[in-house]
Image (cartoon, rainbow, N blue to C red):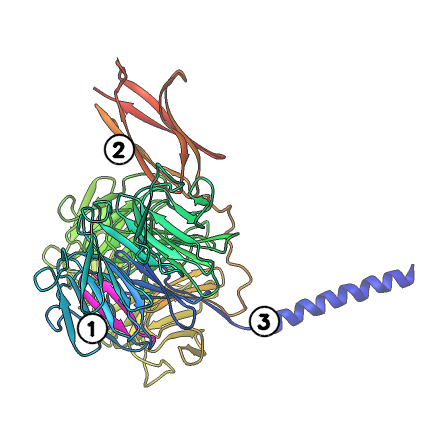
Amino acid sequence: MILESNMKKILLYLIFLLNTILTIYPQNPEWKVYKTALVSNLILGLAEDEDGSKWICTSGGGVSRFDGADWVLYNNIPNQLYNNDVRAVVVDHSGNKWFGTLYGLTKFDGSNWTTYTTGNSGLPSNTVISLEIDRNGDLWVGTRYGGVAKFDGIYWTVYNSSNSSLPNNIIWSIAIDSSGNKWIGTDANGGIVKFDDNNWTVYNSTNSGLPPNSISAIEIDYNGNKWIGTSGGGLVKFDDVNWTWTFYNSSNSGLPHNGIWSLAIDIDNNKWIGTSAGGLAKFDDTNWTVFNTSNSDLPRNDIRSLLIDKDGKKWIGTFYGGVASFNDSNWTVYNTTNTGLPSNHVRSIKIENNGAKWIGTWGGGLAKFDSRNWKIFNSTNGGMDNIVYSIDIDSTGTKWIGTRDKGVFAYSENVWPWTNFGFWNSGLPSGEVNAIVIDNMQYKWFGTYGGGVANFKDTTWTVYNSSNSMLPDNYIISLECETGIIWIGTENGLAKFDSNNWSVYNSSNSGLPGNRILSFAIDSIGNKWIGTAYGLVKFNDINWTVYNTSNSELPENGISKLLVDSENNKWIGTSSSGLVKFDDLNWTVYNTSNSNLPNNHITALACDGNNKWVGTEDGLALFNENGINSIEPNTKIELNYLLFQNYPNPFNPSTKISWQSPVGSWQTLKVYDVLGNEVATLVNEYRSAGSYEVEFKSTVGSNRLANGVYFYRLQAGDYVETKKMILLK
């Protein structure tokens, strides 16, 4: 017994010693960086480079490069793509990437971007919709309304319906056979054209039986057969040696749909056919195999582009579903919700009580990140501005989102549509909202750039500007509140307002080193920390203390963002020199040279326990000095099914019901009266992942519904939700 007692004492001592060691010697600091991947789910072009990286062209989202692990986004910013609507991509023999956009042709050599337009080159049209490289390394460019052009890197040669036998000037597809012949697919009834660099041969519905449709895709198999996809006439095989045409459509074969957008041929000479509404088909010259949203993990049935990589994996670009990879056994889907930030330029961060991060970006809209999944809100699915400057969350969970041009959006989970407040429909004095803060009385304060400060609660707006108050300037950069007081940072000084009295501080009447107030924070003992363009300031309501590059270890004087953590450490974001921690005694600087900080311009800061979330111009960073143990939220991850409130509500004679499904499932949407009697079945079928909307009318068949309350109920898999609507005649 004595031995057992001693062993227990030793064990307890060892546990105590271990805990002491862990406390004294914390884990190493750890960084995790989040960057953009796919910004758009509309995939129009795919290519693979010499390193095996995939180049993914989107409509509206630029180009994403994926090397199997990391994503890099290239879009319409200075010195990159000239236009974000990218319709085609090809990689030449030197590894240059060529992108066809709705405003010109762009070349990327790995370092430099060069754009060719009708204004600076021989390109015959700025709308480039197809690309191919011939065996000499020359680029063939198919355009809309300009015909086809050959570019050898110096000279342009243009072929159109005026100077050649080309039947029309819309070139949807180009393929080049082993003899160097160019096969050119044209618009409706123009047919397919063979060009051997001297002679033109046109095949159309008159002389070949080719369907009178646009030639949307061309591929050449290992036997030299030409496979021709049409926009509505199915698939055609042309053997130009034996002069035989074979036609496949949804009536005489296993082809699931007659509209064909894309074709690819694998190493076994199987044909892969991307259709416009029937999914993906594989044809081995005998058997057909169809993959769609019902029998596979294909995200959409509209296939706009296909690629078979060096390993034989199939890459499928869908319209609205992102890109999928398929290795003949397993599917992997990449889309805007599971690949990362919608834009690397982060402008604001707000963290909910449940741990979800709301991230405002420049150019990509608003992102919600629950530590597992990304959900993106932008101009296409939320109607909001894609540039989000500011975010705050009120006591009801409603998100208030300040944008550059469209004012403020209020978003409550599962409620549709969002509420938009602008200078055109509310008391908001400007559409550019730099800062938002919600005080303890739930008043919303909006700092605008040019219109002063607006205060809003319930339905009442109050505007303070330099004309009707002591506000020193109408250009607001930062806001912060303490009990009963709002602090307002402007381009021309700092203002304090307690609902009755104003106090203004500037470089003439206070210790402020300059009047441009970029950021503001209050520490645990009430000190005000003020970030200016001229240094950091501490104000204890009596004395002013200035920290700058001359008297401290600050790396620069431009203080863009401020955060005070739970241990009263000050985290200081600079304009170009990284992130600084100040514990009132010691300074620690983190930058791109000594850490994994993605960029030295700090644009947003937020704190989640010991995790610091750092927004920059080139990505979002998560930093924990003691190591990132977990970033999982404390609550269960939502499944992301969403049933929105009908609109309008009340309604007469009809209303719209919208919902969102993250995965494909059998879905029913039914309407009931207050007694539980079924009134109508609006949906009862399998639906793939996506967003849907149906109309419900007050007349069901020959019956006119009575005024009153009705309920609509969505069941999708295990998800069930019911909402109320009111018919009011």
Q: Determine the residue positioned at 7% across, 61% down.
A: 162
Q: Secondary structure at mark 1?
A: strand
Judged left or right of residue 357, residue 116 is left
Residue 279 in percent (x, y) is at 38, 45
Q: Which residue is mark 1?
A: 151
Q: CA distance from mark 3 to mark 1?
A: 60 Å
**Three-letter amino acid code at disc 2?**
Tyr
| Residue 180 picture quarter | bottom left
In the displayed structure, 679 sits above or below 260; it is above
Q: Residues within 10 Å of mark 1 (few under 14, many from 20)?
A: some
Judged left or right of residue 191, residue 553 is right
Numbered range of the magenta stretch? 95-108
In the displayed structure, 137 sits above or below 183; it is below
Q: Which residue is mark 3?
A: 26
**Three-letter amino acid code at disc 1?**
Phe
Residue 716 in percent (x, y) is at 44, 34
Residue 681 in percent (x, y) is at 36, 23
Question: Quadrant location of the C terminus?
Answer: top left
Q: CA distance from mark 3 to mark 2?
A: 54 Å
Q: Which residue is mark 2?
A: 647
